[in-house]
Each structure stands twice: as structure tokens, then as C-alpha cells.
Amino acid sequence: MNDGSMASEDTAGLSPGRLQLPAMLVLVAPDSFGDTLSAVDAAAAIATGWTRSRPADRFIVAPQSDGGPGFVEVLAKRLGRKRRLRVSGPLDTAVDAQWVFDSRSATAYLECAQACGLALLDGSPTPETALAAHSRGVGELIVEALRVGAKRIVVGLGGSACTDGGQGMIAVLGGLEAGRQRLAGVELIAASDTEYPLTGPWGAARVFGPQKGADTAAVAALEARLEAWAPELEAVAGRDVSSEPGAAAAGGIGAGLLALGGRCESGAAIIAEHTHLAEDLEMAEMIVTGEGRFDEQSLHGKVVGSLVDAAYPLGIPVIVLAGQVGLENSAVRSSGIMSALSMADYAGSVRLAQADAANQLMGLASQVAARLGNSGPARYR
């Protein structure tokens, strides 16, 4: 749980009576809250809680994703029904992965978390699972997308249990050379949630390995594997893809996709395009967003950072509601965010915030809305 100095009541002026804002149009656009709430469920909880305190406000409910868990669910709301495919999970146990095929544009939208996500592990991640997890299921999804005639394949990256640099995925495609040949003529896009390279102090193993259960020894082993894999990727790609932004995404699956002829794009930008976020921003008078943990990484390639960047030139205030907040108040303010508040602080513990996530998020949203006050139905600006 965060200490009291982070996201306190005084943060950016949300104390009771400090503001009396008239009724306004609120854009509710959260990412998923890890394994506890999908982006769709989080958006519904925020809007419901907010309404309790400010019933005159109107809403645009537009759940978002940066390519991680929830990528397919959000897209399915706009592009059609989800398909299912039985694939290898991160530890070989078969799982049902969901994906979307837009027949109008012959575009397949895949999500690595559906095939090798942390949530698919049988229990909490450990050093053993961190070393054993693989990306073969992602390769199986790509093969299926090719089978149905996809001419454009977008792979949402994030939330993976593996740190294999995409080796499992590429093995399913027949290897690097064969994979490039199979994907020739197909537009391959890595929808990335990170700007980090494959290896080094900001690489997949050292930055994200501990989140996947890796201890010091496991991180070192994973880093050594990736360092040995990087020259193979470079040899087939003709350039050092391991150093490119997004290579670290999903345990290095980003680097594997780049070597197969793909390119990295912002997952948040792809979702924003399909959810018509630019049009929503033109109308919004306040933005409420959120995610499981709000920290420095959130401001680089993720949903919250993308929304803040878009809102700033339009003068739209942004409030972040997160499971936990890992930034000091000064960093929150300097990033252009009005306030960032923690569900764990509101609930009194991380355990309760996770176990009763929807109700705790509703309560936090209601509390924040109440602090804004309500001077009656009038345009905010």
C-alpha cells in the first residue's frame, strides 16, 4: 500500500469544498487493472461510482488498452465477435485464446496475454515459471490468422509470463527464415506497451523479469539467453532489432516480430484509432483514466501517458484512479495530471483492493467526484 505522502487528499486540489465544478462531460477511459478488472469492467465501475456523487454529469465510456490484457476485448466491442483457438499456454497446458478478425480489412488482432499471459499460470509466478514460460501459443495464433487469409496481423504485446524473445513463437513458424517467408506480403504490427530495448539495464529481463517471478539468478539467466538470441535476430533482419524501441515488449516478443519483418506501433494509439478517441477528446471536459499500477512506466507508451499527452494541448484535466500509485505528488503534477489516487489507500489494503476491485473502484470514483462538488448543470468550459 502507498504511504500517505502519495496521492493524498491535497493532491492537485481535490479536498472537499476546494472545487465546485458545474456539470460536465466526462471521458472515462481506463486500461485494465491487471488480473482484477478488465478495461470494460473498470470503465463501468468508474462511471457508476462517479454518478453517485455527480448525477448531472454525462459520460463517454471508452475503455482502452495499450496492447496488453484486454486488447482483444476492447477491439471486439467495435470490430465484431471474438474467435477462439486452442493453443499452447505459457507452460504447455492448452488454453483457449481469443482473437478478432476484421474481414472488411482482412486484419487479425491477436493478444499475447491470451496465449502466454501471467494470468494463465497455475498460481503465482516463480523463478521456475519465469525460466520455463514460452511464446509458442502466439505463433499458433499467427498461423491461424494466416490460414483464414489475414493480410494484416496486429499483435497486442503486454502481460506475458515469458521472457523468451519470441523464440517459441518463431519456432512454431518454422524458424526465422521460414517465418519471414510465411509472412512476406503480410503487414505485421507489434502493438507495444513499452519503448525499451531487448537487453541491458532497461531490457526485458531486468525491467520486467521480476514482475514475472524471476529472482536475481533467473534474471541473469534470462538476460544471457536474450543476449545470445539477439545476434540471430540481427542476422536475419539485417539490422540490430534488439536495440529498437518496443523490442522488450512481452518478454522480447516485440524483438521477434521486428525480426520477422514487423514494425512497432503504440498499442494505445491503435486502440485510440478504433475507439475514435480523438473525437471523444474534442468533446470531453474531464478525463478519468486508470490502471493496476500507476508509476513511471505508465507515462511511456501506456494508456495513461498517451491520454495525458493528448489532453494537455486541449487543456482537459486528467484524473488517474489506480490500484496502486508509485509516483510522488510532485511527479504526478509535473506530468500534467490533476490527481492520481490509489484504490489500495482507499480500501485500506492491497488485498481488499484486489479482492473487491469493482466495489472499491466505484467507491474511490464516488469519493473523487464528491470532492469536485457540483454547482449545477452548466458547461464546464
Image (cartoon, helix red, strand yellow):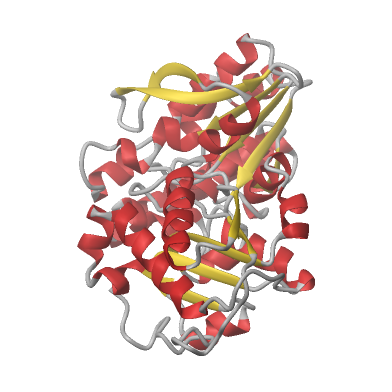
The residue closer to the viewer here, 56 or 262, is 56
Q: Which residue is depicted at the point 49% across and 35% down? A: 112
The residue closer to the viewer here, 160 or 290, is 290
166 left or right, relative to 129: right
Residue 79 % position (x, y): 64, 27
259 left or right, relative to 230: right
84 lies above or below 9: above
Query: Could you tell me if residue 161 is visible in this image?
Result: yes
User: Where is the N terminus found, in terms of image quarters?
Assistant: bottom left
Query: Could you tell me if residue 324 is visible in this image?
Result: no
Q: Which residue is depicted at the point 75% across and 39% down? A: 238
Q: Which residue is depicted at the point 21% across and 61% down? A: 352
307 left or right, relative to 221: right
Residue 132 % position (x, y): 31, 38
Q: Which residue is depicted at the point 70% across and 39% down? A: 274
The residue closer to the viewer here, 375 or 36, is 375
Tally of numbered tags: 0
Residue 8 % position (x, y): 40, 85
Residue 254 % position (x, y): 59, 43
306 left or right, relative to 358: right
110 lies above or below 15: above
The quadrant in which residue 52 appears is bottom left
302 lies above or below 138: below
User: Where is the C terminus found, in terms of image quarters?
Assistant: bottom right
The residue closer to the viewer here, 42 or 52, is 52
